[in-house]
Image (cartoon, rainbow, N blue to C red):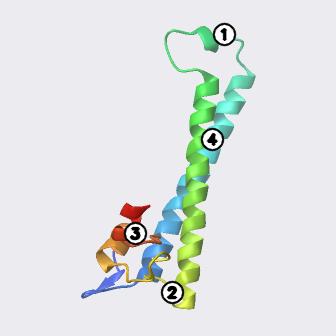
C-alpha cells in the first residue's frame, strides 16, 4: 500500500485509488512508447521475422503490447468507476448483493465491485 494512505486502522481509499491511477497512467504511457518504438523499428527492417527461429515476431510483440495496453485501459476504467462510487457514497458496497466489501479486500483490490461471496458465485 502506498505510504500515507492509511491512518491507524482507517484507510484513505481516495488516496489509494489516486496512487493506483498514477501507476496505471505511468504504465500506459510506457506501453504506448514501447509500441511506438516497436512499430518504428519494424519500418526500417527487411528481415523475415515471421520465420526467425531466434526470437519472437514483430507481430507477436505488437499484439502482446496492444493487449497490455487494453488491460491497462480497462484498469483505468475500473478506477474511474471506483472513484465515482467513492464520490456517491456507494464505494465498498457489493454491486450484486449490496453487502459490505471488507476493507481488507478493498486494500488488495481498490476497484473491487463485489464481495468475495458474490465473486465466487459469478
Query: Label for residue 66?
Result: 4
Q: Secondary structure at mark 4?
A: helix
To which residue does mark 2 refer? 90
Q: In this view of the protein, can residue 1 be seen by the observer?
A: no
Residue nearest the viewer, comparing 104 with 57? 104
User: Outermost residue, front direction?
Assistant: 121
Which of marks 1 and 4 precedes in the sequence? 1
Q: In this view of the protein, can residue 104 be seen by the observer?
A: yes
Q: Residue at x 60, y 65 (%)?
A: 77
Q: Is residue 52 left or right of residue 111?
A: right
Q: Secondary structure at mark 2?
A: loop
Q: Secondary structure at mark 1?
A: loop
To which residue does mark 1 refer? 48
Q: Is residue 45 left or right of residue 68?
A: right
Q: Residues within 10 Å of mark 3 (few under 14, many from 20)?
A: some
Query: Label for residue 118?
Result: 3
Q: Secondary structure at mark 3?
A: helix
| 48 lies above or below 113 | above
Give residue 37's position: percent from left, percent from top: 65, 35
Q: CA distance from mark 3 to mark 2?
A: 17 Å
Which tag is nearer the camera, tag 4 or tag 1?
4
Amino acid at each position: 500500500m502506498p505510504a500515507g494512505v492509511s491512518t491507524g486502522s482507517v484507510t484513505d481509499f481516495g488516496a489509494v485509488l489516486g496512487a493506483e491511477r498514477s501507476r496505471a497512467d505511468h504504465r500506459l504511457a510506457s506501453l504506448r512508447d514501447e509500441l511506438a518504438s516497436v512499430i518504428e523499428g519494424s519500418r526500417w527492417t527487411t528481415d523475415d521475422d515471421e520465420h526467425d527461429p531466434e526470437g519472437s515476431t514483430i507481430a507477436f510483440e505488437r499484439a502482446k503490447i496492444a493487449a497490455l495496453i487494453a488491460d491497462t485501459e480497462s484498469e483505468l476504467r475500473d478506477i474511474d468507476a471506483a472513484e465515482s462510487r467513492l464520490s456517491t457514497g456507494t464505494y465498498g458496497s457489493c454491486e450484486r448483493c449490496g453487502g459490505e466489501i471488507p476493507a481488507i479486500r478493498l486494500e488488495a483490490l481498490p476497484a473491487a465491485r463485489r464481495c468475495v461471496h458474490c465473486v465466487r458465485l459469478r
